[in-house]
Amino acid sequence: MVQVDAERQQRLTYLRNKANDLRTTERQLCLQLAQVRESLSSVCSEEAEITNLSTPVSSLPNEILGEIFRYTKDSYNVDNIPDVVVVSHVTRHWRNVALSNPSLWDTIRLNASNPSMDLPIAFLTRSKPCTLDITLAVPDYVPMSSLRMVSVLIPHFGHIRRLVIECGDNEQVVQQLIESLTDFHAPSLEHLEISLELGDRQDSALWGERVRIFSSGAPLLSSVALKGISLRCCNPPLGTITHLSLDSDGDGTMLMPYDYFREALSACSSLIWLELRGRLFIFTLSNTAIRIEIPSLVYFAVGYPIHYRQDHYIRSIFETISAPALRTLSLNYMHRQTLQVAVDFVQSHQLYPMLEHLRLEEPAVECITADFIRSTASVTHLTLIYVGGIPRKMAALAPLLRHKHPPATPADALWPRLHTLSVYVFDEVFLRDLITTRIAIGAPLVTLRIESGTYDGLRPDQIEWCRARVKVESVDFDL
């Protein structure tokens, strides 16, 4: 029995020693394997680098490669990673080129629902010393703590060139976000855009009488676009503004007093481009419109919710705004009767003696009369945007443009200077008749511009017929 136990103990000792030896060998082999893998990785990396240097793209100068990378700035892959990040991980050379071009990293999107700020911080670091294009996205139901993203921007605020705030149905967070901008100095800011998509109207209890943002100054600010939020709720310095767009987004926007609206426009002493969509201010039958002259204004677009029929409101806009140097007038989608008020007012007051481009969205086509055309005889470019009921709509306008009884001279034609026609849809019968008749009366069209999607669907014979008589262009429409 004692002899058996001794044999077992001896065997156990042997096995333990053997196991230790094997473990030692295993560690040595693992270390060798790690060294082999490291060497293999280095060899493969050098092999890939030499292979890549042999490809035609590697012969491109760094400046050209950087310009190619610039086309990836605003695109993302399926994992929502910016493509500029992806290309910077392809090769060492590409990464060096990407990192040495700060302008590749100056477009930054911060999403309040994303807890990680690593990517925006990396972009902010790599973009120095460029000015920045910043988008702050505030989706529905994000908590107030999401405003921490503003603190990331504070050290860089002096470099922001363009600031876009996209907000869902989260008015309280948006109000706090805008309040945080009140005292900022924005020396590089050129464009401000705020969009608020509320399921209901703005809550007036959340907002003060007037929220002034960038009160420390924004000397380069030239463009402001507000959608779904009142100008009173985020009033930036207006003295240098050249482009202003106010859109009530249906019924959501808190209305301004008329005097405030007029005061704001008066402050825009350099305004050249103005777009007013929806119901923006309070104007009742007891109010009196007071005219302000904006001598620099050359583009004016007006739109009004089709379910509103307050004719005095739309009339007050034209009574208030005097633009003697206006070049483009855009009458956008609104109720036909309300639109007729605008058309009649423009016609009777001869408001725009220098008008060159008239842009009509449906149902404006049906409101045009010969007297209106005569009151805008300086028009050289007509844009027609309509979707449904084309034959009926064009039937109202066609006689005015083609003339059943041709005038004695081209100067007697309606819109005698008209040389460019832009159309959203292609009404073949109307366009053939119009083109041939204008040629016959000696006032031919020179250019026919067709919306790109419509143009792509045309038959070759339709395009060729037009090209034989006018210059045809495929264009994108801004609706």
Image (cartoon, rainbow, N blue to C red):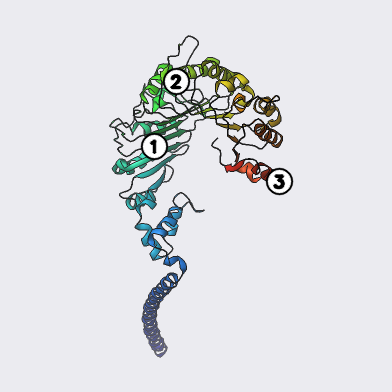
Q: Residues within 10 Å of mark 3 (few under 14, many from 20)?
A: few
State yes or no: discs 2 and 1 in contact (Cβ < 8 Å): no
Of labels 2 and 1, earlier in sequence is 1
Q: Is residue 88 above or below residue 324?
A: below
When asked about the image quadrant of residue 219, the answer is top left
How far apart marks 3 and 1 lie (CA) works out to 45 Å
When asked about the image quadrant of residue 132, the answer is top left
As rendered, which of 345 and 253 lies closer to the eye?
345
Residue 307 appearing in the image: no
Point out the image quarter for the N terminus.
Answer: bottom left
Helix, strand or loop under label 3: helix
As rendered, which of 274 and 371 lies closer to the eye?
371
As rendered, which of 253 and 341 lies closer to the eye?
341
Q: Is residue 290 shown left or right of residue 356? A: left
Task: Give the labeled residue for mark 3.
Answer: 461
Of labels 3 and 1, earlier in sequence is 1
Task: Give the labeled residue for mark 2.
Answer: 322
- The number of discs equals 3
Q: Mark 2: which amino acid? A: Ser
Q: Mark 3: which amino acid? A: Asp
Q: Mark 1: which amino acid? A: His
Of labels 3 and 2, earlier in sequence is 2
Helix, strand or loop under label 1: strand
Q: In this view, which residue lies farthest toward the bottom?
A: 3
How far apart marks 3 and 2 lie (CA) works out to 46 Å
State yes or no: discs 3 and 2 in contact (Cβ < 8 Å): no
How far apart marks 2 and 1 lie (CA) works out to 25 Å
Q: Is residue 344 above or below residue 89?
A: above
Mark identifier at residue 191:
1
